Image (cartoon, rainbow, N blue to C red):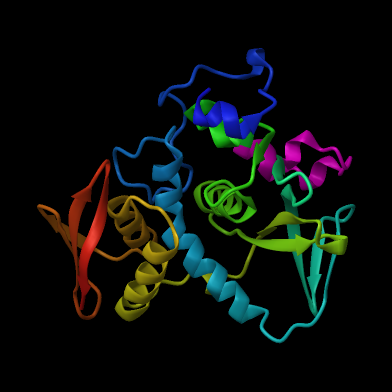
Amino acid sequence: MSLFQHLFRKQPPSPETPPASNAGPGAPVGFFPEGVDMSNWDQVFSACLGKMFTVQHAFLDLVKGEEGWYIDFEKGTLTLGKQEFRVQFLGSESYVSNSWLWGWENINQFPDNVLGQVHIARTYGQAWGLEPLIHAQCELNDTFNGHNFSMVVCGALAEDRCYYRCPTGGGQGAAFVALCDMPGELFVPVDGITFINNTSQCIQQFYLDHKIFAESFLRWNKTPFDWNGDTLTAHFGKDVTVEFEQAGEHYRIKNLKQ
């Protein structure tokens, strides 16, 4: 039994699933480096993480001090303190069954107006052959979970999205929603020091292809850069140099400095 067969359950009906290949659409958000295998979860996640790590921290600053939250799936809104955001339901984690369930399965009978983003994610998953976006349900682990799924859906498939985790009663699970039409201040470019700090945190916390991560982060940040072999130089106000070395199938950062 393969890893995907073990982790993922409930295959989609075969007539709806196009052949798994890279002939489908590319990432709608154009910061992925050339050559990223869109059927490879590690590569796609690596490309999305720099952007989403930065955006999520900016979102936390935006709502800092706001007390209490309320979600209305009929209206498609999330209220955080005095602020209200339009949302799309992505999926849910159950800590009872230790599983993730994509929102397009819709066991909660949510209205169609809050499911558009997750249907888009499934369509692109089928076109790319990206299995974690195709299967309705999977076991939770450090790689496949609500946070990581939300970062890919909001990172690769939209320009103005972040996400929010809504704990369910009794601590038995959580719903994840995409927040839509977010203010532009969440997506402004970061400086060299912030790039270094965010990169250092991400490579410590996540399993990544560091080359794909760093180049995608810089592309999203609209920072010019040059390659010289396995060394990347990013042209901030003061240049940042990133040196890589190969570690198995991936590359990892061995030196990061300004």
Depth order, front residue of 238/230: 230
124 left or right, relative to 216: right
**Residue 175, picture quadrant:** bottom right
> For the point 87% across and 62% down, which residue is it?
169
Name the outermost residue toward the bottom: 65
Depth order, front residue of 228/157: 228
**Residue 42, picture quadrant:** top left
Asked if residue 124 shows in the view, the reply is no
- Main SS of the magenta segment? helix
Q: Is residue 230 above or below residue 27?
A: below
> For the point 71% across and 46% down, which residue is it?
98
> For the point 43% across and 36% down, which residue is it?
26
Give the number of callouts.
0
Name the outermost residue toward the top: 15
125 left or right, relative to 203: right
Task: Tell me where the magenta segment starts and ends, as one range.
Answer: 102-121
Residue 226, horizontal then vertical, whole percent: 16, 59
Residue 110, horizontal then vertical, whole percent: 86, 44
> For the point 64% across and 14% down, which residue is it?
14
**Residue 233, picture quadrant:** bottom left
Residue 53, horizontal then vertical, whole percent: 49, 65
Residue 135 within the magenta-colored segment of the rendering = no
Q: Is residue 129 above or below residue 221?
A: above
Residue 124, horizontal then vertical, whole percent: 55, 33
Asked if residue 24 shows in the view, the reply is yes
17 left or right, relative to 232: right
